[in-house]
Amino acid sequence: MDTETALSALAALSHESRLAAFRELVQAGPEGLSVGELRERLDLPPATLTAHLNGLRTAELVQDQREGRVIRVRANYPQMNALIAYLTENCCAGATNCGPNSVCIPSTNGGQT
């Protein structure tokens, strides 16, 4: 992920309702939620939810698919994982015990070995 893409994703998540929508979709799993279900869970007016989903779509954090008269929205897990990787890619610089389930603890020597 490049810096511009990361900034777009972070900007999209920087609003309370967009973050709540994204978290609901992540929790819903790969099947996602219909826009109506998401709207009910968040208690947002339809136009407001549409605007927030457009922000998340622009950042490629969600994807949607029409299923007849219903639009199903899903979290874009690869994009989410890429953002997490981008944010943490330097946390283990110089560490020998760093892995996917490790906690990032900043080095006291600035990553210098």
Image (tube, rainbow, N blue to C red):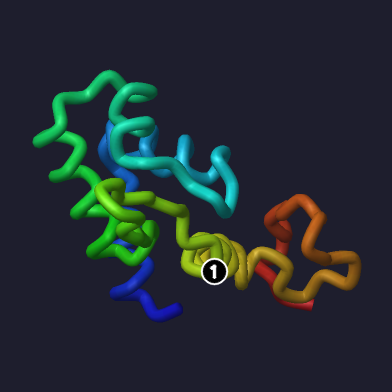
Residue 16 appears in the rendering: no
Tell which of 42 and 109 is nearer to you.
42
How many tags in the picture? 1
Which residue was labeled with disc 1?
A: 78
Please give the name of the residue rendered at 32% of the width and 22% of the height, measured from the top-left corner. Answer: 40
Vertical relation: 70 (above or below) 43: below
Q: In which quarter of the image is the C terminus?
A: bottom right
**Can you tell which quarter of the image residue 30 is in?**
bottom right
Residue under the point 72% across and 57% down: 108
Judge left or right: residue 37 versus residue 44: right
Give the image quarter of residue 8: bottom left
Left or right, residue 46 beside residue 58: left
- Type of amino acid under label 1: Pro
On the image, the x and y values in percent for residue 84 come to 56, 61
Question: Which image quadrant for residue 106?
Answer: bottom right
Disc 1 on helix, strand or loop?
A: helix
93 vs 113, left or right, is: left
The answer, for residue 44, to whether it is visible in the render is yes
| Image location (x, y in percent) of residue 54 | 19, 54
Query: In the rendered image, which quarter contains the N terminus?
Result: bottom left
For the point 77% across and 75% down, the residue is 94
Percent from the top left, x then y, of residue 15?
Answer: 26, 38
